[in-house]
Amino acid sequence: MFTFLKNDMKFVETEKNIMNSNQEYNLIAYDKKVLGNEDILDIHEETEELQIERYLVKKGDDFIAILDYGLSSPRHQKPWISLLAVHKKYQGLGYAKKIYLLYEELMRTQQVNCIHIAVHSTNKSALNFWTSLGFIQFDERIYEDKVILSFEKILD
């Protein structure tokens, strides 16, 4: 149903299209509604420094989402999701949950026993989404003048 395609610099326009369909998130995370090429390049550099795997998710011929994850989070050295962004026109169809469950299964095959994610405290839809999947908040901190909540899911 979904194909994970390694994300790199040749997909800047595709990534920008997905990110800019989520202007509310951009405002929360980047303090602006629309990201430009320079912003996407900055994201690529930051994720490279953090050793994050970056994927575009396709359904058929359509790019519908971005999934970024790492195996050692900067603060807790645990596997973590850095970003799951679904294009606005594909939201509400259950795709984010299905993409996450594919990721979780991948982590299980690698004998991972927990997954972390950090969520902006003002991103109510993300907070609802992650808690509905069994993530439990374990930390709160300030990062770049924003309240960030850390969540963990233990994999049985």
Image (tube, grey):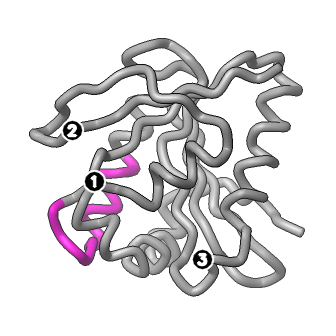
Q: Earlier in the sequence, mark 3 or mark 1?
A: 3
Q: CA distance from mark 2 to mark 1?
A: 8 Å
Does residue 48 appear left or right of residue 45 in this picture?
Answer: right
Residue 122, numbered label: 1
Give whichever of 89, 7 is nearer the camera: 89
Could you tell me how far apart the alpha carbons at marks 3 and 1 are, in whole angstroms?
19 Å
Which three-letter amino acid code belongs to the residue tagged 3?
A: Gln
**What's drawn in magenta, residue-wise?**
31-44
Residue located beneath label 3 in the image: 91
Q: Quick check: is 85 in the magenta stretch? A: no
Which mark is drawn over residue 147? Answer: 2
* Mark 3 surroundings: few (<14), some (14-19) or many (≥20) residues within 10 A: few
Magenta span has 41? yes
Q: Nearer the viewer, mark 3 or mark 1?
A: 1
Q: 55 or 113: which is nearer to us?
A: 113
**Residue 43's spot in the image, x, y percent?**
35, 51
Instruction: Please say if 73 is above or below 102.
Output: above
Task: Please tell me how crowded label 2 is: few (under 14), some (14-19), or many (20+) other residues with Cα within 10 Å.
Answer: some
Which amino acid does the dot numbered 2 rest on? Val
Q: Amino acid at mark 1?
A: Thr
